[in-house]
Image: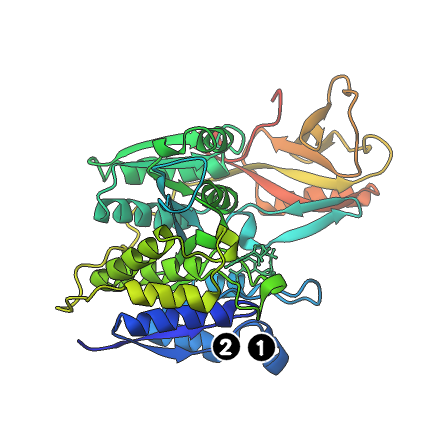
Amino acid sequence: MSKRTVTLIEGDGIGPEIAKAVVDIFSAAAVPVTWERAEAGLVSIDKTGSGVPPETLEAIKRNGIALKGPTTTPIGGGHKSVNVTIRKTLELYANVRLAKSIPAVETRFKGVDILVVRENVEDTYAGIEHWQTPNVAQCLKLITRQGSEAVIRYTFEQAKLLGRKRVTCVHKANIHKITDGLFLDVFREVAAEYPDIVSDDIIVDNCCMQLVSRPEQFDVLVLPNLYGDIVSDLCAGIVGGLGVAPGGNIGRSCAVFEAVHGSAPDIAGKNLANPTALLLSAIQMLQYMGLVKHASAIGDALEATLASGTRTRDLGGTASTTEFAAAICAKLSAIDDDGGNAARVATATAESLSSNTEAWTLVGADVFVQHEGGLPPMPETVGPFTLRLMSNRGTKVWPGPTPDILIVDHHRCRYVASTPVTRTDILNLVSEITASGITWCHVELLNQASGEARYSKAQGE
Ligand code: NAI
């Protein structure tokens, strides 16, 4: 069988130790892959000043597949997270984590088998943050129709491939009506194309509560980035913690598999690390590559080893990393190598929902202004605009009685016109506000389509 080249990034801390365990087990199982080593993390920062040198990104693109050990992100110093750089540069838009009970690992719950798919690029992780005033910071939460479709379609394809029965969209659309509302709308549109899979949705807080009381009720979850980040760790905890939590980052043309845990500097170089999570990630990678027989054989040997009581210290055992890996190698059964079966991980499918091209009418602007000490003296009319309301941290403070709330130096002033306006009108509005001595911070346009607002209505509006 021809060998496929896989990029291997050992990473920092315990990375080289657990990567060696996986390489040894793959070799004992005669997995038909050749490793091409590439650097990322502290080693690379020391040598090149960059956590992910261009050669590493090129290698992943060339091979289309990588196994990555954990990398340390230095705190401060402006170093970007290696993981975020890899995910964003290669547009690895789906983070896929399996939270499955391992019979030999004691936890509060039994029979958990949840596939968690997290959108991996957008949301507040677009990393667009600004100070609005010296006291007010803002982070943009970006959810797009195309980005949502990509991850949701991938989730349904994966559910179909694995014969899973139900996909649940996790969101907070009751509060984030526009952003999470878009994610949920796209979910419903895509779900309609998969009538054999039950689809439903749940609000993220309720989902967390249900997960820690009856996790076995869930099958597949799909979530925007931030909720996915949190909920996928919660799911990892439910099945035994980070030591046994695998993950894969899937893009249109490449995929990177990595354990969920970090570089564990406290135990690095001591032969104590548990390689299970990286090995499970490597098994997920083999499934993606269609090498399902090798994946099953290694998975069975891992389970048998854990069941026999051979475990690393974090799981209550005494085995070293190398002893644990050797025990898995010893339990490997012969693999009938008649080629790979069908891949068990869906590859990306092209997005097909049509782009929204509705015509918008500009009707006003929210002008955010900086002002200390109560409400700013805003002009009530400017050209075609009328000041409809002011709010502070989302609570309406004008017109009407000002509620007894904390007023900070960042005010949203909503100006609307009774007839359509132009962007030049908005520029004039901002100029007049500036001429009256008021400091504006930023402006958001108020658009309508089919008579409906394309912005959130203020409380009481
Ligand atoms: P961590 O996951 O490295 O360690 C947390 C605790 O879990 C430590 O006590 C550690 O000894 C233990 N632990 C983790 N993995 C283990 C394993 N395989 N076997 C046995 N024990 C294990 O999290 P921490 O300390 O917050 O982060 C350390 C560094 O790792 C940071 O620089 C962080 O940025 C980075 N990190 C990297 C990730 C990645 O590359 N995917 C993910 C998370 C953190």
Give the position of the C terminus as an image quadrant: top right
State whether residue 442 is above or below residue 393.
below
At a point 48% along the width and 28% down the height, the residue shown is: 206
| Residue 325 position by quadrant | bottom left
The CA span between labels 1 and 2 is 7 Å
Q: Are marks 1 and 2 in contact (CB under 8 Å)?
A: yes
In the rendered image, the residue lying farthest to the top is 401
Q: Is residue 434 left or right of residue 146?
A: right
Q: Is residue 220 left or right of residue 364?
A: left
User: Where residue 339 sits: x, y (%)?
Assistant: 15, 68
User: Where residue 359 sits: x, y (%)?
Assistant: 42, 41
Q: Amino acid at mark 1?
A: Val
Residue 43 circle label: 1
Q: Is residue 285 visible?
A: yes
User: Where residue 120 sits: x, y (%)?
Assistant: 46, 53
At a point 35% along the width and 50% down the height, the residue shown is: 307
Which of these two is toward me, 312 or 167? 312
Q: Which residue is mark 2?
A: 39
Question: Looking at mark 2, is its residue's CB closer than 8 Å to ligand 1?
Answer: no
What kind of element bears circle 1?
helix
At a point 42% along the width and 30% down the height, the residue shown is: 202
